[in-house]
């Protein structure tokens, strides 16, 4: 599948990436390779494929789907060092 340079620029803009004009050719080539791989995967025959969740034989233990008592926010906030207007107050990280 071929991608135009206009599409490369649009993808860069949407993803907020800055791609220099020198690198556009490289990005174009790599994206086309990825899309070619996806096309190849889509062509794979999967109708007679067995779905296996695990080759190890182990399975995840699932919890039962039953109602449990909800966590009481007020009880949890009693343990918090600082609360403001019903919310946990934490140190500022970003200015």
Image (spheres, grey):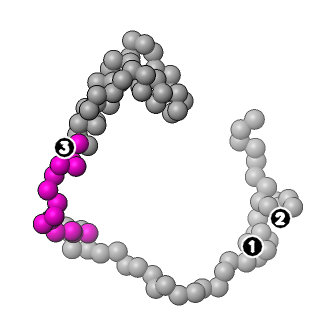
State the residue position of label 2: 86
Seen in the picture, residue 62 relative to 44 is either above or below; the reply is below
Q: Are marks 1 and 3 in contact (CB under 8 Å)?
A: no
Question: In the rendered image, which quarter contains the N terminus?
Answer: top left
Q: Mark 1: which secondary structure?
A: helix
Q: Is residue 30 visible?
A: no
Q: Mark 2: which secondary structure?
A: loop
The numbered mark, 3 or 2, whose residue comes first in the sequence reads: 3
Position of residue 64 measured from the top left corner of the image (x, y, whole percent): 46, 85
Look at the image and say whether residue 48 sits in the magenta stretch: yes
State the residue position of label 1: 73
Q: Are marks 1 and 2 in contact (CB under 8 Å)?
A: yes
Q: Residue at x 16, y 69 (%)?
A: 50
Q: Nearer the viewer, residue 58 or 54?
A: 54
The numbered mark, 1 or 3, whose residue comes first in the sequence reads: 3
Question: In the rendered image, which quarter contains the C terminus?
Answer: top right
Q: Residue at x 16, y 64 (%)?
A: 47
Q: Nearer the viewer, residue 71 or 19?
A: 19
- Badge 2: few (under 14), some or many (20 or more) residues near its Cα, within 10 Å? few
- Badge 3: few (under 14), some or many (20 or more) residues near its Cα, within 10 Å? few
Magenta residues (range): 39-53
Seen in the picture, residue 57 relative to 22 is either above or below; the reply is below
């Amino acid at each position: 599948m071929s991608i135009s340079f206009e599409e490369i620029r649009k993808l860069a803009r949407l993803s907020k990436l800055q791609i220099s004009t020198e690198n556009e050719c490289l990005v174009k080539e790599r994206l086309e390779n990825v899309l070619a791989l996806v096309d190849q995967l889509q062509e794979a025959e999967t109708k007679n494929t067995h779905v296996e969740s695990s080759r190890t034989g182990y399975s995840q233990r699932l919890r039962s789907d039953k109602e449990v008592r909800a966590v009481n926010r007020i009880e949890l906030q009693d343990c918090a060092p600082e609360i403001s207007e019903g919310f946990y107050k934490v140190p500022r990280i970003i200015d």
